[in-house]
Image (spheres, rainbow, N blue to C red):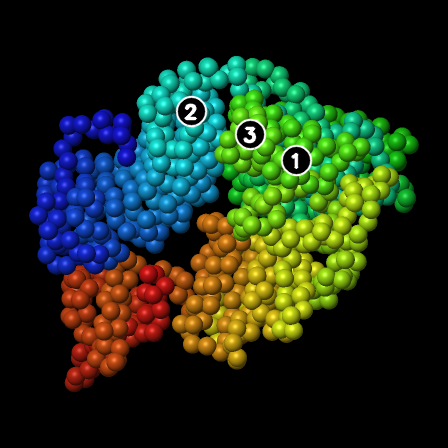
Amino acid sequence: MFTTYHALSIGASRIACPTHLLALSASGSRMNTSQRKMLSLALSEAQDRASPILDLSHDALGFRLRAPDIRWLIRTCKPGSFQAVTHLLLNGHSLGHLEVNHLRTLFAHIGPIQRLSLADCELGDDGLKALIHLHDTLTALTAIDLDDNAITADSLSNWLQRASLLEQLIALSLNRNPLGDDGASVLAYYAPRLAQLQHLELARCGITDLGFAHLLPAVLGPPWRESLKTIYIRHNPLREVPELISEYHDKEHWIMYAATLLDSRRILNFASVLIVGQGGVGKSHLRRRLFDKHTDYFVPNPPRTIGFDSYTWTVRMPLLFEEEALIARVLDFAGQREMHSTHRLFLSDRRCVFVIVCDATRTRDENRLDYWLHLIKNEASPQCPIFVVVCKCDLYDARRDETIPRQLEALSADELRASVGLPTDTLLEVHDGIGWSDAVHAGVDEAIRTRHWTAIETLERRLIESMGYIPGVLNRYSPLFSSAIGWLEREGLRRNQSSEMPYLELSTFQERCRDGGLDDGHILAALRIAHSLGIVYYAGLRTDVSETDELKGLLFNPEWLRVPLYRVMTKGRDLSVRGLLSPKQIETVLPEHSTNATGHTLWERCEFTRVDRQRIIRVMLACELMFEARHQSGRVEYLVPDHLDARAARDAPRGDYVWRRRFRWLSESAFCRLVGRLHRQASRDQAAIWRDEITVAIAPNMEATVRMVIGRNDTARNTPDGTEVFVAISGCPEQEARRIRALIDGELRSIIGEPLIGADEWVRVGSGSGIGLETGLGEEISVDAECLLEALVRIRESERRSPEHAWRSKFDWFGHADYDRRREDAQEKIQELLRRGLIEVRTRGKAGKWRQYRATMAGQEYIKGRV
């Protein structure tokens, strides 16, 4: 916790709560009256002494502050009470992500906080996400301690991307968080945003030598080379890194170590260029013109791409102070919708450049430009360079001898980046003006040809230059590591047509690496990079593939694997019935055949056996492209959700209990996986399924419906209500319905990943098809009103056997809540709860002079939802 930075504050007076509070530990419950009085006294002493440090940590108090205590503390700290405080410690309290929002008022009451300690506060990913919205109250913050909060690399990336205070941070402590190598890569990528950082702590974060390789160039490059003074990486599983670096924290040791590595370590000169876009927009033409050097290539009716086509592009590019030959694998993906789910198996999240191709004769919506940008951001990597290329700009139809009006609007890189929510430092460029046809070749307009050539040359130059912006491309690895990946590329699968292999035994690769001196950790790291580059496809990297599964021991050749996968997704659609394929139908789509040296694809050239077909099915099951459907009779079929039709309903489904969750963006393939998982739990006759909806019979007279609605209100492209997921449950008590909804939510989270960035919370809506029946339970009430409501809910729960005894007068009610009933805003809080229907009131006595209050069922549900 700021091991070095603490030394800057030696001599500052420190105010902590009295030590006799240690004897009043609440054993996990809320503070009692004595503890509150003691804490009030300590706060008064801190205020009188005008100390710059306010220590409210668990170590100082002797007990953990719970949710009600935090709200009580907020009410106790009046505005302007602690203007002298610059360092606030809240370590060790069970804040969680819900209570982080309540800290806004506390921060506003305290002076300009420069150092904030939130170690061991159970923030998690959601808490770090909530902390982003409090930065406007922390404008003077220069140091933050987030030790031991279960923060992952994904949430750290989101925080570093969106936080507004990073430029002024001097110290950042992330000890004992499960960041791993991905977290180290995230920190290295966002180093330019931490331009003033002097102290960085990453002890016990699970960083291996691979993560260190990500950090090293960032520490040595701008701006950290000038600003960073110390970096702590103790107690991480580092093998090749010298003890001098892990034990001593001076940056100078990193510089000396880098000097010794410069001559021995090499840059891994592999990358990928991934070309995506709708069908027929000109992707294959662009690939031929750009990478095959056929600038004038044109075919009037080109064959449709099946799956993807690959090409190897070798370029010489400047990296650091030397020139490297970079081998880029160019993958041209088919644009037809039925192939999109399979694309995610081959889309990379590292060491790649994305090229989105648009057709100038189609609108932005027809090109689905926002869809492809969201796909890259959410299912690949928002950190890699992105090029939006506009083709067919000649706008001339030779068959009709007429000019085609341009439909695509003028595109701005800044507008695209902002509309999708990409990081502001993501390299995104728009290249317009590419277009060439036989009409131009006939000399219709020489200016069009000149513009086309110029656009192609500019795009090629910028693609080469962008390779230096790929995260991790400048990292250096030992020669053994580079040679292992090079062996896979050149010899492992023997890619020359004379001796090609559909797959390779993992043990063969491991034996080759061990003979070369690599340990198991580096072998796995090499496999991850080779998999992300498309050199091999290794299903064993998936966590749901068991150690005994055959897939764990096979490295597939992507050139061989892609054909049977895409054949099942395309040709199988014509044979499936309601999305179901029988083993016999799969055999029809993937027939056995012998070696054919003249085959067009690797799959056709290699022998294909019954065992190979079973392996293809296993890959599709592991990647959730298909799901096993076992009937009560024992017969087995396979559900392919992408073969289902869409119901395209626009309203909420009917049910006794209906909830809605809004997403900024949710892919159809992700929802198809949810449909497959839910269908797997029911027989064929028990489920009514579409690609955007499924109804499952859970028990007799009990069913659940899950529906996805895209753009129901026809709002702007990227508003939060662009995609909605509804869950409707009937035939069971509300408590059971909530449990079922939680199970469905868990499946959705495991598919999309945590945290659910850009997703709202579940909101209760009315039953039936109308959306205008919202209860409003998803909206928050003020902190004071919630504290009062919580007191009434506790009273009602204690009197649940006699609800009539739960009525309380204002005097009794406010006493339970420890709230001054004479405050000016007391009646306002009561009215706030009454308007929301969270409490009810009745009059007693002569002429209705006395009033009593009781929590309603809606109020109880609100408090349960908050907890």
Using a 10 Å C-alpha cutoff, classify the residue at mark 2 as few (fewer than 14 neighbours), some (14 to 19) or many (20 or more).
some
The amino acid type of the residue labelled 1 equals Ile
**Does residue 220 lie above or below 756 as drawn?**
above
Residue 553 seen = yes
Which residue is under mark 2?
A: 241
Name the mark nearer the viewer: 1 or 3. Answer: 3
The amino acid type of the residue labelled 2 equals Val
Q: Quadrant of the C terminus?
A: bottom left
The amino acid type of the residue labelled 3 equals Arg
Q: CA distance from mark 2 to mark 3?
A: 20 Å
User: Whole-percent x and y of residue 433?
Assistant: 74, 33
Q: Is residue 328 left or right of residue 92?
A: right
Which residue is under mark 3?
A: 514
Q: Residue at x 60, y 73 (%)?
A: 686
Pick whichever of labels 2 and 3 is earlier in the sequence: 2
Q: Is residue 185 left or right of residue 504?
A: left
Q: Are marks 1 and 2 in contact (CB under 8 Å)?
A: no
- Residue 668 occupies quadrant: bottom right
- Residue 1 occupies quadrant: top left
Residue 336 seen = no
